[in-house]
Image: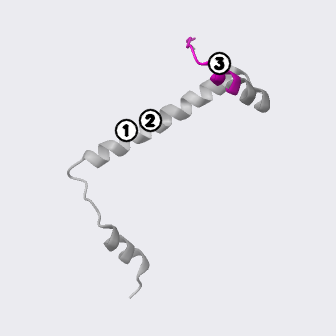
Amino acid sequence: MSQITAWVPDELVEALDAVAENLKRSRADIIRQALEHYLEDYDDLDVALERLRDPSDPVLDWDQVRHDLLCTD
């Protein structure tokens, strides 16, 4: 495991300490979990953007999709 150092505003440290105290966890645990969630979200966004830029991926018409899902003939 590696150690990193970051400078953050005092207000952010105060908020971090409050969350850590409420959850009975260390600052490091809260920061580690926050980074994991951020990186997972970033990966998901990256995949979504790749799919949006893929010219072979068809664009669906919302009205047609809605009709297909909701209408029972």
**Residue at horizontal 69%, vertical 21%?**
27
Q: Locate residue 27 relative to residue 39 in the image: left or right.
A: right
Q: Helix, strand or loop at disc 2? A: helix
Q: Is residue 38 left or right of residue 62?
A: right
Query: Label 2, on which residue?
Result: 42
Which residue is located at x 37 percent, y 38 percent?
Answer: 46
**CA gap, disc 1 to disc 3?**
31 Å
What is the secondary structure assignment of the residue under circle 3? helix
Task: Give percent across and percent down for residue 20.
Answer: 73, 27
Above or below, comparing residue 4 to residue 15 in the picture: above
Residue at mark 3: 10
Say which residue appears at 62% left-offset and 24% top-offset: 31
**Can you tell which of label 2 and label 3 is closer to the viewer?**
3
Kindly report the distance in space between the C-alpha atoms of the residues bearing marks 2 and 1: 6 Å
User: Residue 33 is drawn in which quadrant?
Assistant: top right
Secondary structure under tag 1 reads: helix
Mark 1 near mark 3, Cβ–Cβ under 8 Å?
no
Location of residue 49 with respect to 6 vertically, above or below: below
Circle 1 residue: 46
Do labels 2 and 3 touch, CB within 8 Å? no
**Start and end of the magenta stretch?**
3-15
How many other residues sit within 10 Å of disc 2, few (<14), some (14-19) or many (≥20)? few
Mark 3 closeness class: few <14, some 14–19, many ≥20 residues within 10 Å: few
Query: Where does the N terminus fall, quadrant-wise?
Result: top right
